[in-house]
Image (cartoon, rainbow, N blue to C red):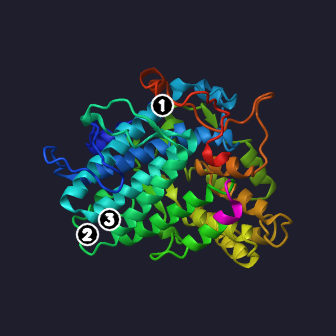
Amino acid sequence: MKYSNKIIATLGIAAVLLSTGCKKYLDVNVDPDRPLLASPGPVLAGAQVTGAYTLGGADFSLVTGILTGQVTGADRQFGNYEKYQLVADNFNNPWSSLYQGTLINYQELLHTASAKKYFLLGGITKLMTAYTVLTMTDVWGDIPYTDAFKGLEGQYKSKYDKQEDLYKTIDGLITSAIADLNNPVPGVNPGTYDVVYGGSASKWIKFANSLRLRLLIHQTKKDAAGTAAKVIAAAAAPGGLITASADDAAVYFLDDESRANPLYQFNTQREGYAEYNDTYLTTTMEAAGDTRLDEYLGGFYDSPNSSVLMITSYEVEFILAEAYVRAGDLVNGKLHYENAVKASFAKVGAAIGNYLTTAGSFDAAANKLNLVLSQKYVAMYLQAEAYTDWRRTGIPALTSKVTGKEIPRRLPYPQSEISYNSENVPGGLTINSKVWWDQ
C-alpha cells in the first residue's frame, strides 16, 4: 500500500536498485570491478527506515492485527481483509519495498563492509538482514533469498528458499554478526546513521542474542521441550539480552507529516479503513481492567513520532517465561512473566496497580502457559509477532470472524511474483496453508 513514502525521499536516500552477487551469507563475494559505497551510513539509515516503515505499517501490523482480532478492517481492501479476502495484488508493494528498498541495500552494505573490513557495519547489516528475512518468512513461508540478489550475474528470477533452510541461514547470520561485532578492529562506525542503536556494538549483541530467542521459540510445534531447553541455554549467551527498555530495538519517526510514523500516516490519510475499538483485544482488556488500553487507543503506537518496535525487553521476558513454564520451572517462569508484564505497562506509561494479583496473577492461573501467552498477546499490540504466536500455540483461542472460513495461516505471494517469477513461486498453496514451523 502506497499511503506515503515521503519519509525515504526526505532522508535523501535512494534505494540501491541493482542486485548484487553473494557467494553465501557469511562470505560476501567482493567483485573488484564493482564500485563500493563511498558513504555507507546513509544507505544503512535508509534501509532501516524503509524496513521499519514497511514492517510497522498497515500492510504488516494492521493486516496481522486484523487476523488476530486486535484490529477491525472496516473499508476498502481492509474491509476485505476482515472477511479474509487476502488477494495477491494487495501485497506487491510491501514485497517490493522489502526487497528493493531494504534487503538489496543490505547486500550492498555487506559487499562494502567485507571489502573494507568494516566489521561493525557488517555485523549490524547481517542482523538487520536476519531480522527482515525472519519477519518475511514468518508471514509468507518460503521466500527468495539465496538467489535473490544476483541481477549483476544476469539472474533475474529467483528460486525460493525453504523456510526450514532460511531458519538455518538466519541463525548463521546471527552467529556471524556476533563475531563481527566482537572484532577488536571494528572499522568505521556508522554513528547516528544507525537509527536503531547509534552504532553501539554492545546493544547490537544484545539484539542478536534476543533475535535468536525469537527464532528458537517459533519452533515449539516441532519440538516443544527441546525448544524450551534451547531458549534457556541461549539466554546465557555472552553479551546478554534486551532486558531493559533502554535497550529496546526500535526505529523512531518524527513529528512531521512527511516523516511521521507509518500508522499515523495511514490513519490520517485513510481514515476509517481500520477501527481499533470493540475488538477481541479491547474486549479482553476492558474485562481485565487493563489500564494499557487507554494508551493503546490514545496514540502511543500511532502518533507522528511513535516508534516502530522491533524487539523489546517485554518480548524477551515473555519468551523466557514461556520456555521456563514449558520446562516445568515455575519459579523462573513466574519471575520472567512478571518482569514481562511490568515492562509492558511501563513501556506505554500505564499504571500497573494490582494487575499481577488480579487478572494477571500467575499463582492463580490454572494453566500457566495459557496465561503467559495470553498476556504476551496483549503486550504485542500491532506487532506481527502476535500472529506468529497464535499460529504456533493456538493462544488466545480466537474464533473466525467469517462463518465457514478459517483464520488465514499465511499471506499470499504478491501478484508481481506470480506474473514474473511464476516458475519459482511455490504451487498448491492457499492462505490456509501452514508454514513450516506451523506444521
Q: Which residue is drawn at 20% across and 56% down?
A: 115
Label number found at residue 199: 3
Helix or strand or loop: what does disc 1 sit on? loop
Compared to 190, does 271 lie above or below?
Answer: above
Q: How crowded is mark 2: few (under 14 residues within 10 Å), some or many (20 or more)?
A: some
Most extreme residue toward the left is: 33
Most extreme residue toward the top is: 419
Q: Mark 2 points at which residue?
A: 186
Residue 20 appears at what percent x and percent y? 27, 41
Compared to 419, does 318 lie above or below?
Answer: below
- Along the line of sight, which residue is nearer the eye, 309 or 408? 408
Residue 91 appears at what percent x and percent y? 51, 30
Label number found at residue 1: 1
The residues tagged by marks 1 and 3 sit, at their Cα atoms, a distance apart of 31 Å
**In this view, the mark in front (1 or 2):** 2
Question: Of the residues under marks 1 and 2, which one precedes in the sequence?
Answer: 1
The residues tagged by marks 1 and 2 sit, at their Cα atoms, a distance apart of 38 Å
Position of the C terminus by quadrant: top right
Query: Which of the 4 image quarters holds residue 430?
Result: top right
Q: Give the range drawn in magenta.
A: 222-227
Residue 62 appears at what percent x and percent y? 59, 40
Residue 315 on the magenta segment: no
Query: Which of the 4 image quarters holds residue 334?
Result: bottom right
Q: What residue type is labelled 2?
A: Pro
